[in-house]
Image (cartoon, rainbow, N blue to C red):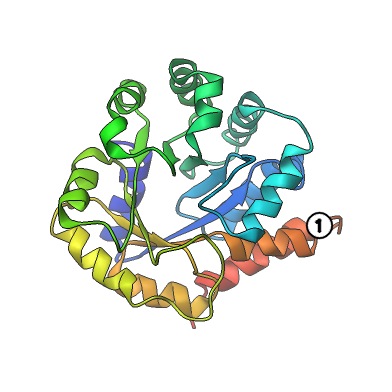
């Protein structure tokens, strides 16, 4: 059983739901990314999504786009991100998922990535622009190294497509709450719950809902019908707002903790 699967099993056994914060690797720098991962683990993260900065993040809204731009100014590559994960593994066992577009992974080399990600103890990889029809070879590589491949499902996905995603995903399925790009919203989309119900018809895999979740009440609402809530832009915005301040990491931890505190 993978570490992601074991985490969701433990949550279910204890009648709890998951919290999955997202940050962009290298924003504001790789040293702080190490600190942020550990702080988010302390704040109650069940799984942490670590974004690989990319110059054309078409699924992301302006907040995460700016985070990618800041990170890319440092000029590091995927190897440096894996080094960060390798370093934090000395202090935490919280599952870590690389959240990326396919181009940086191809540039690094898929076989090399699967091998080195296992050595760094990466638990899963989510590739936003890799469709399941074209993921067979990459999926087999990751499976050989005990790494989960996580797919996105959208409210606009047909039932046939949801079935394909459910059959080919491992770890969990990431349900996109609405059409469009990432970014905090005032209200949660009603489409998210319908999508999770449809996914349940095809798979017993845990379902995490993301896109637009930014407040404790959003997390609580998602927890009614899904296994985990993903929060990205709202956390990245706190990093942006407090960049350069000596207690920035602590403020991010406080915000993350407030999202999962009982209302």
Picture residue at 78% right of the left edge, 38% below the top: 73
Mark 1 crowd level (few <14, some 14–19, many ≥20, 10 Å Cα): some
Q: Which residue bears the numbered disc 1?
A: 243
Q: Is residue 95 above or below residue 39?
A: above
Q: How many marks?
A: 1
Q: Is residue 81 above or below residue 65?
A: above
Q: Position of residue 65 (x, y in %)?
A: 65, 52
Picture residue at 31% right of the left edge, 62% below the top: 14
Q: Which one is nearer the viewer's eye here, 30 or 202?
A: 202
Tell me if I can see residue 262 in this picture.
Answer: no
Q: In which quadrant will I find the N terminus? A: top left
Tell me if I can see residue 117 in this picture.
Answer: yes
Q: Quadrant of residue 134?
A: top left
Position of 152 with respect to 100 (left or right) is left
Picture residue at 72% right of the left edge, 58% below the top: 239
Secondary structure of the residue carrying tag 1 is loop
Q: Position of residue 86 (x, y in %)?
A: 59, 29
Position of 247 with respect to 113 (left or right) is right
Position of 1 with respect to 234 (left or right) is left
Q: Is residue 95 above or below residue 141?
A: below
Q: Position of residue 203 (x, y in %)?
A: 17, 51
Q: Quadrant of residue 209?
A: bottom left
Q: Position of residue 83 (x, y in %)?
A: 64, 27
Q: Residue furthest bottom?
A: 263
């Amino acid at each position: 059983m993978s570490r992601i699967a074991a985490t969701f099993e433990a949550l279910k056994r204890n009648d709890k739901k998951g919290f999955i914060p997202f940050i962009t690797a290298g924003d504001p720098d790789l040293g702080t990314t190490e600190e942020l991962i550990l702080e988010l683990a302390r704040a109650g993260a069940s799984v942490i999504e670590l974004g690989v900065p990319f110059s054309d993040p078409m699924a992301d809204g302006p907040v995460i786009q700016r985070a990618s731009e800041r990170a890319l100014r440092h000029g590091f590559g995927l190897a440096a991100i894996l080094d960060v994960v390798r370093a934090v593994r000395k202090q935490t066992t919280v599952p870590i998922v690389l959240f990326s577009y396919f181009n940086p992974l191809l540039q690094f080399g898929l076989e090399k990535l699967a091998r080195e990600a296992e050595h760094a103890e990466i638990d899963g990889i989510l590739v936003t622009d890799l469709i399941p029809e074209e993921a067979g070879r990459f999926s087999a590589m990751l499976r050989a190294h005990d790494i989960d491949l996580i797919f996105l499902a959208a409210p606009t996905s047909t039932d046939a497509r949801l079935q394909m995603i459910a059959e080919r995903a491992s770890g969990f399925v990431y349900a996109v709450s609405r059409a469009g790009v990432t970014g905090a919203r005032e209200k949660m989309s009603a489409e998210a719950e319908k999508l999770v119900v449809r996914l349940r018809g095809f798979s017993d895999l845990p379902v995490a809902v993301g896109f637009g979740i930014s407040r404790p009440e959003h997390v609580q609402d998602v927890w009614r019908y899904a296994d985990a809530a993903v929060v990205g832009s709202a956390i990245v915005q706190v990093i942006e707002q407090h960049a350069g301040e000596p207690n920035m990491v602590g403020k991010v931890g406080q915000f993350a903790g407030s999202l999962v505190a009982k209302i």
